[in-house]
Image (spheres, rainbow, N blue to C red):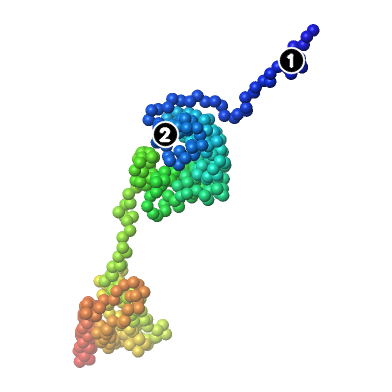
């Protein structure tokens, strides 16, 4: 029984089988080229890279590159189809791999974007692809790899625009990792720095506003969105709409009440009572007769008069005027009532009246130190009014009454003697 298959002789006599060379790039169907996609529209530096291709092939590749650039914003999927076609026709040129990678990035094909952009970077050694490579890692759910590109040595070779783009990508990766405050810190200096706005400043401030929003700092996020909208002349972002929408959802800030408003501190008003008479001034009215003073056995000491309720403290009257000191009763002038009805009050009353008049005429003490301690103002001498306490007149009237009583008593005693 013959075994299935060819024998050794048959295999040797048969012509060798042709196998296609292994390739990692599948064949793609070339999309139709639009009429407006002409090779003349391609950048001069890019056209120089296509000079190594045959003439007809160079023109076809150039038209696909132009078509990919034209459709990148309007139709990213169709732009990717043109980029893939250009890369399949000239796979060893960095410009075609770069075009395919950028188109895949815009179309959301992040795995394809990584392959094409890394290939372009290996070919020309440029660092300009780092922001898109890092963002593609983030799009594939690997934000920690995107953050690592921030400190990569190749990042030092980026121009200012590339560094700004890498910062934006790194900020988004920090937010993906649940680190919104770190994202804010990453962009704060560039977003709030001085100087004229650059072409990438609007998008950087937009990313800064989103980081603030994730950090729960809504009021600051509104201001950042408004700042981005103010310089976004090309309308690259929707910062104006975001700012309006966010501001309408924020609670209105309470207006400060008039009572809480900060007003200059007014000086304390000077009360008339404290301006004229110090509270600590003491008068001789507090002096008391010595407890050891004794009158003769036949003499009786009259009871001390009581102060009526509601009267002012000694030395301060109810009208805040200076009052006269009470008569000082000493050991030698203690009033005594004799058997014949006469009293020794006449001399004491006269002395009290003299002391009252002397105290009224005496100048006020220097109260500058006391007033400065209390925070008050001393009344100048020119503004002081003469003090005419009513107690003086009352004291004089009492003296007259006492003298009249003494005269009447003495007259009665004389008449009795007669």
Q: CA distance from mark 2 to mark 1?
A: 54 Å
Q: State the image quarter where residue 340 is shown.
A: bottom left
- Quadrant of the drawing holding the C terminus: bottom left
Name the secondary structure under disc 1: helix
How packed is label 1: few (under 14 Cα within 10 Å), some, or many (20 or more)? few
Between residues 410 and 167, which one lies in front from this camera angle?
167
Quarter occupied by the N terminus: top right
Q: Which residue is mark 1?
A: 10
Tag shown at residue 39: 2
Image spot of residue 412 (x, y percent):
21, 87
Tell whether 226 sits left or right of 383: right
Locate residue 115, reporting x and y percent. Answer: 56, 35
Q: Residue 322's image quarter?
A: bottom left
Mark 2 burial class by Cα count in 10 Å: few <14, some 14-19, many 20+: some
- Residue 349, compared with residue 60, is above or below; it is below
Q: Nearer the viewer, residue 77 or 108?
A: 77
Q: Residue at 34% x, 43% y: name it.
A: 233
Front position in the image: 301 or 40? 40
């Amino acid at each position: 029984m013959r075994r299935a298959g060819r024998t050794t002789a048959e295999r040797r006599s048969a012509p060798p089988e042709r196998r296609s060379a292994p390739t990692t790039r599948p064949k793609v169907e070339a999309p139709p080229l639009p009429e407006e996609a002409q090779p003349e529209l391609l950048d001069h530096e890019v056209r120089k890279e296509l000079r190594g291709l045959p003439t007809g092939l160079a023109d076809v590749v150039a038209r696909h590159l132009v078509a990919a650039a034209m459709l990148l914003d309007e139709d990213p999927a169709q732009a990717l189809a043109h980029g893939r076609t250009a890369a399949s026709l000239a796979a060893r040129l960095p410009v075609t791999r770069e075009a395919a990678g950028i188109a895949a990035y815009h179309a959301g094909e992040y795995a394809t974007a990584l392959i094409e952009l890394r290939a372009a970077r290996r070919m020309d050694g440029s660092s300009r692809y780092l922001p898109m490579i890092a963002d593609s890692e983030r799009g594939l759910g690997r934000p920690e790899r995107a953050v690592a590109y921030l400190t990569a040595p190749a990042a030092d070779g980026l121009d200012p625009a590339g560094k700004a783009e890498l910062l934006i990508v790194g900020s988004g990766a920090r937010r993906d990792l649940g680190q919104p405050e770190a994202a804010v810190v990453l962009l704060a200096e560039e977003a709030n720095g001085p100087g004229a706005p650059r072409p990438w400043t609007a998008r950087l401030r937009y990313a800064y506003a989103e980081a603030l929003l994730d950090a729960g700092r809504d009021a600051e996020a509104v201001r950042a969105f408004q700042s981005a909208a103010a310089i976004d002349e090309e309308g690259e972002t929707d910062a104006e709409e975001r700012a309006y929408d966010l501001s309408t959802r924020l609670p209105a800030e309470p207006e400060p009440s008039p009572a809480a408003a900060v007003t200059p501190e007014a000086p304390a008003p000077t009360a008339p009572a404290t301006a004229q008479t110090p509270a600590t001034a003491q008068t001789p009215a507090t002096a008391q007769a010595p407890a050891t003073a004794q009158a003769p056995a036949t003499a009786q000491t009259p009871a001390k008069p009581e102060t009526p309720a509601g009267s002012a403290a000694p030395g301060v009257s109810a009208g805040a005027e200076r009052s006269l000191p009470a008569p000082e009763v000493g050991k030698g002038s203690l009033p005594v009532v004799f058997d014949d009805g006469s009293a020794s009050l006449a001399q004491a009353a006269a002395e009290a009246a003299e002391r009252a008049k002397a105290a009224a005429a005496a100048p006020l003490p220097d109260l500058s130190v006391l007033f400065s301690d209390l925070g008050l103002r001393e009344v100048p001498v020119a503004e002081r009014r003469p003090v005419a306490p009513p107690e003086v007149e009352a004291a004089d009237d009492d003296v007259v009454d006492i003298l009249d009583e003494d005269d009447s008593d003495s007259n009665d005693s004389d008449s009795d003697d007669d």
